[in-house]
Amino acid sequence: MSLQVNDLKVHYRTLRGNVHALDGVTFSLEDGEIMGLAGESGCGKSTLGKSLIRLDSRMHHAGGSVRLDGREMPIADDKAMVPLRFHEVSLIPQYAMSALNPTRRIGRMIDELLRARGVRPADKADELRRRLELVGLEPDVLRRFPIELSGGMKQRVVMVLSTLLDPSLLIADEVTSALDVSTQRSVAESLVEFRDRGYVRSMVFVTHDVSLVYQIADTIMVMYAGHVAEKGPAASIVSEPRHPYTRMLLSALPEVGSTSGERLQGIPGTPPGLLDPPTGCRFRARCPMAFDKCVERPPLVETAPGHWSACWKTGEE
Amino acid sequence: MWRYMGRKLFVYALTFIVAVTINWMIPRFMPGDPVRSMLNRGSISDPEALERMTAYYNEVFGLDAPLHEQYLSFWAGLLRGDLGISVMLYPEPVVDVILRAVPFTLALLVPAIVLSWIVGNRFGAFAARSKFLDNSILPVGYVLTATPYMWLALLMVWSLGIVAGVFPTAGGYSLALTPGANWEFVSSLITHWFLPFLSMFVVALGGWAIGMRNMIIYELEADYATYLHALGAPRRLVRRYAFRNAMLPQITGLAVQLGTIITGALLTEIVFNYPGLGTLVLDSLDNRDFFLLQGIFLFVVVGVLIANFVIDIVYVLIDPRTRVQMTGGSS
Amino acid sequence: MSNIAGASGATPGSAPGPSGERRGSEALHFARRNPKLLIGLTLVLGFLLLGIIGPLFVDHGPNQYVGPQSRPPSGEYWLGTTTFGQDVWAQFVYGIRSTFLIGILGGGVAFLIGTAIGFLAGYRGGIVDEVLNMLTNVVLVLPALVVLIIAVAYLDARGLVVQAVFIGLTTWPWAARAVRAQALSLATREYVDLARLSGRRTWRIITTEIAPNMSSYLVMSFILLFGGAVLTAAGLDFIGLGPTDGVSLGLMLENAVAWSALQLGLWWWFVPPGLAITVIVGSMYILNVGLDEVFNPKLREL
């Protein structure tokens, strides 16, 4: 098992108090697993992605643990995380279009980064070229400035760079949202290819586009208001969702490939504020199936092999 | 990208035309007879000379001719390099008077601008390192930019020149010496140059430091910086990139600040009675020598335009983004 | 760009569109704890008060010859006297008053022109933008003080208001540029589109939809223009193009130099006026940084 996240709590410090963005999140990733992470904006999926690699200055680790390949990750300690970054955990950010220093030639920037991370650029030069070709880029891009590349090309350069040191875990944060549909497909397929070739061991694919994640992910985890609602094999999540929120999310699914699925019109109401979150099941105010018991927080239980759901109703069935 | 340069050149040409037009218009549309008011204030004792001058200036202004003819002949004179004849130093042509002063002004301006830019950028980058440095360097920078050029110059003349007596307080060189390429004269030039230079340098420093600090903070927030941090890049590398990228807007800032710094140079020269354009402005105002004044104005404008153009070229050469577009490379 | 909205949505601390009230109180919270803002504001208000009240306690004109000549500061003449026996303190407080006046008037005129042109260019775009941008660039390149010297030199009688108007006419361009850039980004927002669709008039949209959303930015622009106007006016005064028969800090510097205060060692004549300009403008700038930190959450963290 490559990644184990146990009861992870990450809060944002704000003037009005702590925002409980991740409030006890538990899941694990098998070797080679690509997990799609879905949910509405503000459900904590991006926070989870960041927590696994670098907390920003307002985030703090309030509890729980993260283990990668059996070793505890010191996610609260920015300095101690440095050796893990890039080597063990890596990131494809959602701002991949602007992730490259605009005034450096791409090859030079990569060399400088590698050297700063204690890797001899010459050792990786051939591999770098091979992988660029794999995603359909000429090695010539290394001599160019980012401005000379199209959005899709930049996206692919970032993909290759982020995975160059064969990390154990890759976090792909909304990587496809800024791309057109056909580029989305090819980027997603490249990511699967990278996994198949062992460039990355496992992957968390953060997206709000469930239809896309279904095409590439082995498993899907749905989050709601800082909690895990459901996690299971992609096919069974889509075909037989257990959690009422997942069902509504799927029924409200935007057209395939649409990037405007940010606000789900199909679900009335809005997610609760996480500054002072309600007790019990966080979905109960919007849930058509809510009943008395929902004032208690439902545990995440395994309802079928590898399929977990946090709902009193599904837990019973 | 050549289009970009073309646009810039067009704006500069337009600016030049506007400046010339202002120059032509002001004496004609301000209340009063420019020739009389000019000659009244000038201390001309010889009545014959006065008459000659009045005739000359009346002809130059050509106030009898229709306005468009006046305007065209004004341009014609200008293109011949004829800026008229100085009242104050009659009958010396304005151009000669100005050309004598220009080297002194440039000798102050160029080193002050270049050095303050380099040092200020370093300070600013340094300030963005920590909250403590930021809180100490930043206010100093703001106080410096708020300092009137002439006041710091006054303080320097008074403290280092008069009270301490370390530096000469007026002029461009000792009047006891005859200009020549000997060491005595050169050292006199340098000692007279140092204080005005220093005072300009110090005031200009603050602005650059602040600009750099703000740009670096902006750059450190940029996506590429966040990405590098996420990949575990050391702060040193990220800062180096941020510094380099922040330099680029600072070059543009050079063009924007040019007017302010030139103004500062003129004021500083006046305090030190330094024989550059600033002192010439004051003298021509005192003598109501409008021809000289307008000549200086045109020289300054042309200087600013040339400097702007040079900065544009440097920027295009340094910023890969514009350079790439210029060579026609595209994806 | 829904992905960007999604990103900030995931960080609830800066959730987009908190209610106005909450945002106001948050700004106030940071304002009270921001030393730059507090120190800057205190100094500016202190000098403003001195400029308003000070002259009321001086029972003679600032240029009157009232006392002994060239006296250092004393209990009677707080800032000493000039070589002619004028009371430097009296000139000083009147000078501060006119410094604020020129800053508000000159900065105000520049602000009005700059924001009007900036808004119009940024909001309208197209050919209007092109032309206004060209105009802005032309005026930007011309060195303001040198233009002012030429223009003001021909005036026989100069007043503070005329000076202020001239300063305003020559120093607006960078404000126009800055406002244009801001308005450009705001003009494409949804609510502005909505207002435009509903057929509201341009200036109504600018004043009711766009301007309020950049009010903090506008305040900061005004402060910078204020500082610029004060410094420019001081420069003009120093060259001898200040208000005729007026009092100002720049004129004090001019007179001090003209009557050899430096050589005679009358430091009380030229140190206070320059110091006052520096402190007033400097604390304005520092106040500005404080405001920026209060209104721009990103800067709070560094």
Image (tube, rainbow, N blue to C red):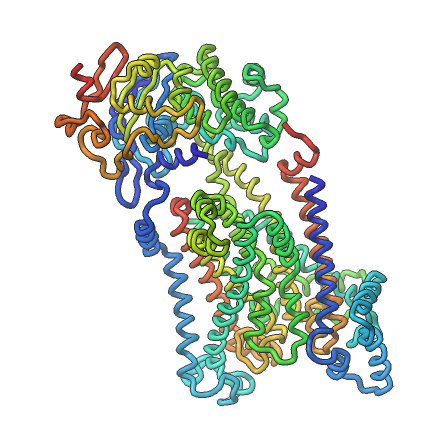
Q: Position of residue B113 (x, y in %)?
A: 64, 55
Q: Position of residue A289 (x, y in %)?
A: 19, 25
* Residue nearer the viewer, B88 or B157: B88
Q: Horizontal placement of B127 versus B197: left or right?
A: left
Q: To which quarter of the image does residue A74 belong?
A: top left
Q: Position of residue C140 (x, y in %)?
A: 62, 57
Q: Is residue C260 above or below residue B185?
A: below
Q: Residue at x 18, y 20 (%)?
A: A313
Q: Horizontal placement of B298 versus C227: left or right?
A: right
Q: Is residue C196 above or below residue B238?
A: below
Q: To which quarter of the image does residue A275 belong?
A: top left
Q: Quadrant of the N terminus of chain B?
A: top right
Residue C159 in view here: yes
* Residue nearer the viewer, B271 or C47: C47
Q: Horizontal placement of A11 versus B161: left or right?
A: left
Q: Quadrant of the C terminus of chain B?
A: top right
Q: Residue at x 48, y 29 (%)?
A: A178
Q: Horizontal placement of C277 versus A260: left or right?
A: right
* Residue nearer the viewer, A248 or A271: A248
Residue B164 in view here: no
Q: Is residue B309 above or below residue A237?
A: below
* Residue nearer the viewer, B308 or B244: B308
Q: Residue at x 46, y 34 (%)?
A: C1
Q: To which quarter of the image does residue A102 belong?
A: top right
